Structure formats: structure tokens, C-alpha cells
Amino acid sequence: MDFLVLFLFYVALVLIGGVMICICSKTHYLKGLVRGGAQIISSIIPECLQRAMLKLLHYLFHTRNHTFILLHLVLQGMVYSEYTWEVFGYCRELEFPLHYLLLPYLLLIVNLVFFTLSCVSNPGTITKANELSFLQVYEFDEVMFSKNMKCSTCNLRKPARSKHCSVCNRCVHRFDHHCVWVNNCIGAWNARYFLLYLLTLTASAGTMAMVSTVFLVQLVVLSDLYLETYVDDLGHFQVVDIVFLIQCSFC
């Protein structure tokens, strides 16, 4: 089966799976499937291995650790190494503008700056010293946020739009979520760094994809590949078309 067909089949399965999860999540059917699947798996996997897996999952997602920070840096390094090795050198030979090729590296530097700030900056930790000032920022609606509500762990009055993070064991002002990739909570004081980190990460991926696409198109044009023919599975000569070129690009 052709690569492109397999890829489209994979994309279709992912989309169908996402739609099914969204539909089933509104009913008790998904919970029953998950419970049944968990029982089947627990009967197959030895108990000692189950405990080890649970400990590993608890360490990765419910404790502060640097595992995903290191994984993020390794993956980013691998992507940029591949770009430098496979694309940058050949693009220089084809006399691509240097500033055009260096843009992903510039975005990488900016991205790492905001990634570091997201990791080390204070998200808005509520303490005894700043508790009163945070209490005055947002009004209490007496529905979700009550004036007299206290955090049972920190023993502090909970300002409106604050939440206790069980991973970091602290209350955070305007808490959004705990991100394992930056090993930090995302709250009022570092949300801007986190958003800029996501934007620059997306931009760097987009520029590398754009440079790689232009590079592949340039190769096709210079080699006159679009004028060639090939022999299909039935032994017939076929003119090279766009679908064939896309499949060749992924080979």
C-alpha cells in the first residue's frame, strides 16, 4: 500500500477516534469501556509490573521533575540537527538567502528564552505575605469563589480565580494548569511567557516546514522530475503527478 494512502488512513483514524471520544465522553459508555479495558489489562499484566507502572506515572505526572524538560530539549535538538544536516547545507548550495535560512535558529533562541522563563518564573504563588493583595484583585461571585473559602492544605484564604496545585503543593493566583513540559504551574505572572513560548515554538516549526517545502519544490524543478515517467505496479508507464511527487518526498 502506498505511503500516502497509509498516511491518509492514519489521519482518518485519528479524526474518527477524536470524534468518538467526544461523543462517548458525554455518556457513561466511555467510562464503561475504560473500566472494562482496565479490568482486562489488570488480569493480564502481573501485579508487580502494575505497581511499577503506577509509580512511574505518578512520578512523571504528579511530582515535580525535569524529565519532560530534558525530553523537550532532546527532541528540539534532534529536529534542528536534522534541519541543519538535511536542509540547511543543500539550501546554501542552491543559493537560498541566508537570512531566510537563519530565521528558524533566531526563533529557536527566542523560544528557549521564553521556555526558560516559563520554567523558572513565579506563576503567582499565594503566601501569607501577599494573601491580602491577591484577595482584592478579583471579585468573589459567591458561586464558584466564596469569600470565606480557605485552602485546606495551605491554610490560606483563597482569592477568586486561584487554585491549589497538588503537584507543586501551593496555591496559585489565576491558576491555569500545571505544565509538565516546563515543570511549573501556569498562572497570572507567567502566562504571558508560556503563550510566547508556544507562539515561537509554532513559528519555528512553521518556518522550518516552509523552508523544507521550498527546498523540495526547488529540487523537483531543477531536476525536471515532473517531466519524468515511472512504471506502476501493473508494469505500465505513468507520467509523474503531484501525488507521486508527494510520496517521493516522504521516502
Image (tube, grey):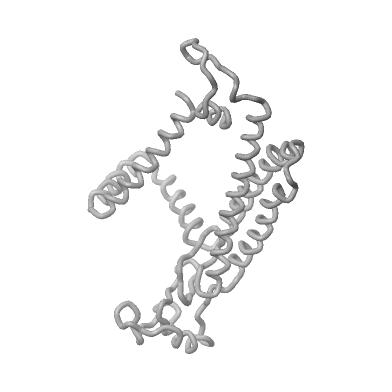
Q: Quadrant of the C terminus?
A: top right
Residue at screen point 69% across, 58% down: 109
Indicate left or right for 93 with 3 as reference. Answer: right
Judge whether 95 appears above or below 107 on screen. above
Q: Which is more toward the observer, 82 or 171?
A: 82
Q: Which is more toward the observer, 48 or 91?
A: 91
Q: Where is residue 89 drawn, in percent x and y? A: 74, 39
Residue at screen point 25% across, 55% down: 26
Residue 98 shows up from this direction: yes
Q: Residue furthest left?
A: 28
Q: Where is residue 53 drawn, in percent x and y? A: 45, 49
Q: Quadrant of residue 148?
A: bottom left
Indicate left or right for 21 with 188 as reference. Answer: left
Q: Residue furthest top?
A: 235
Q: Which is more toward the observer, 246 or 81?
A: 246
Residue at screen point 56% across, 32% down: 250
Q: Quadrant of the N terminus?
A: top left
Residue at screen point 43% across, 52% down: 54
How many marks on residues? 0
Indicate left or right for 52 with 215 as reference. Answer: left
Q: Where is residue 68 drawn, in percent x and y? A: 56, 55
Indicate left or right for 190 with 2 as reference. Answer: right
Q: Which is more toward the observer, 240 or 138?
A: 240
